[in-house]
């Protein structure tokens, strides 16, 4: 022992406590590596499942968007049976066919906006196959009921503050503000125009509508809201399109009613009237420049 010590050889003894510390550190290292491995496996599984769900959703959306349109035979059958119902509130065959023809002219899925929930509502949804069909109604309870009964229907309620008896004053107010709040090209969400509907869901003001049907609200007695605001709003939405087809088909049902005809002359314009038959007025409006300050190129019959 002395010789070994004298030669410079040192004997190192490890305390049992230090040995325990080394073992503990190794256990912690093994646990940490196991945790990282488990976390990696869970992340890998979650990523694969998310990718699978995303891929499935994308494929489903692609199939939906590329599904073929309704055949002419199916369209004719729908129009025929809808117009031959015993319900006296329904549109005539001629009126329905005008709208059906306009929907078929869309080169891509149509954006179809309808003012009024009517007996034809399900028909409009069916005819606008693959497209977006939105209904606006004055009765919040009926709109909610309709959506609950038919989950595929997209319907919203809107408050009309107008009265049928106020039509002359309302039209005069628009003419006074035609360069400001009542411009023919604008985002009505930010408008204070008396005839502009500014309480629709925000997203609807960004949609480029291809076909608009005004078949509501009620307008058969002095205190009824009348369709002045709906017609005015339809005219602004059509002229304010940012993309898609620059033309918009606007249909006004009950065009034989004086108020509807006069308001249409003012804001949809006689020069854009394509056809007037039975109870339907059919207008085709084109997108206008943002600096425009007149609805019609020529004075309307009512203003003259």
Image (cartoon, grey):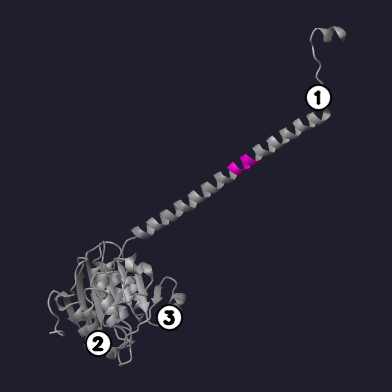
Quarter of the rendering occupied by the C terminus: bottom left
> Which residues, given as a range, are shown in magenta?
35-40
In space, the residues marked 3 and 1 are separated at their CA atoms by 84 Å
Q: Nearer the viewer, residue 10 or 252?
A: 10
In space, the residues marked 2 and 3 are separated at their CA atoms by 27 Å
x then y, percent, for residue 81:
31, 79
Left or right for 60, reference 124: right
Q: Residues within 10 Å of mark 3 (few under 14, many from 20)?
A: some
Q: Secondary structure at mark 3?
A: helix
Q: Using the rendered view, name the quadrant where residue 223 is placed.
A: bottom left
Residue 14 tag number: 1
Q: Secondary structure at mark 2?
A: helix
x then y, percent, for residue 174:
24, 80
Q: Residue at x 20, y 75 (%)?
A: 283
Labels 3, 1: front one: 1
The answer to which of marks 3 and 1 sits earlier in the sequence is 1
Q: Residues within 10 Å of mark 2 (few under 14, many from 20)?
A: few
Tell me if I can see residue 278 in this picture.
no
Q: Residue at x 20, y 77 (%)?
A: 268
Residue 186 tag number: none
Q: Nearer the viewer, residue 257 or 238?
A: 238
The answer to which of marks 2 and 1 sits earlier in the sequence is 1
Q: Which residue is mark 3?
A: 140
Q: Secondary structure at mark 1?
A: loop
x then y, percent, for residue 98:
23, 75
Question: Which is the main secondary structure of the residues drawn in magenta?
Answer: helix
The answer to which of marks 2 and 3 sits earlier in the sequence is 3
Q: Which residue is mark 2?
A: 169
In space, the residues marked 2 and 1 are separated at their CA atoms by 103 Å
Q: Residue at x 30, y 91 (%)?
A: 220
């Amino acid at each position: 022992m002395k010789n070994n010590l004298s030669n410079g050889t040192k004997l190192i003894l490890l305390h049992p406590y230090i040995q325990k510390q080394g073992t503990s550190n190794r256990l912690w290292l093994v646990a940490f590596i196991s945790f990282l491995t488990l976390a990696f496996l869970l992340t890998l599984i979650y990523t694969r499942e998310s990718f699978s769900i995303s891929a499935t959703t994308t494929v489903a959306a692609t199939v939906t968007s590329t599904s073929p349109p309704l055949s002419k035979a199916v369209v004719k059958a729908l129009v025929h049976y809808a117009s031959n119902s015993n319900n006296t509130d329904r549109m005539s065959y001629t009126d329905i066919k005008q709208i059906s023809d306009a929907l078929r002219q869309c080169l891509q899925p149509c954006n179809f906006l309808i003012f009024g929930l009517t007996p034809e509502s399900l028909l409009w949804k069916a005819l606008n196959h693959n497209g977006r069909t939105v209904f606006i109604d004055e009765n919040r309870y009926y709109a909610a009921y309709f959506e609950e009964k038919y989950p595929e229907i997209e319907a919203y309620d809107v408050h009309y503050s107008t009265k049928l008896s106020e039509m002359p004053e309302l039209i005069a107010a628009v003419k006074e503000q035609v360069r400001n709040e009542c411009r023919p090209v604008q985002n009505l969400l930010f408008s204070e125009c008396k005839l502009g509907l500014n309480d629709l869901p925000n997203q609807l003001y960004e949609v480029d509508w291809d076909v608009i049907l005004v078949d509501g609200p009620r307008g058969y007695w002095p205190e009824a809201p009348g369709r002045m605001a709906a017609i005015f709003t339809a005219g602004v939405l059509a002229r304010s399109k940012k993309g898609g087809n620059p033309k918009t088909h606007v249909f006004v049902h009950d065009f034989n009613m004086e108020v509807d005809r006069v308001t249409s002359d003012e804001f949809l314009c006689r020069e854009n009237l394509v056809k007037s038959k039975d109870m339907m007025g059919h207008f085709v409006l084109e997108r206008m420049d943002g600096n425009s300050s007149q609805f019609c190129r020529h004075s309307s019959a009512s203003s003259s």
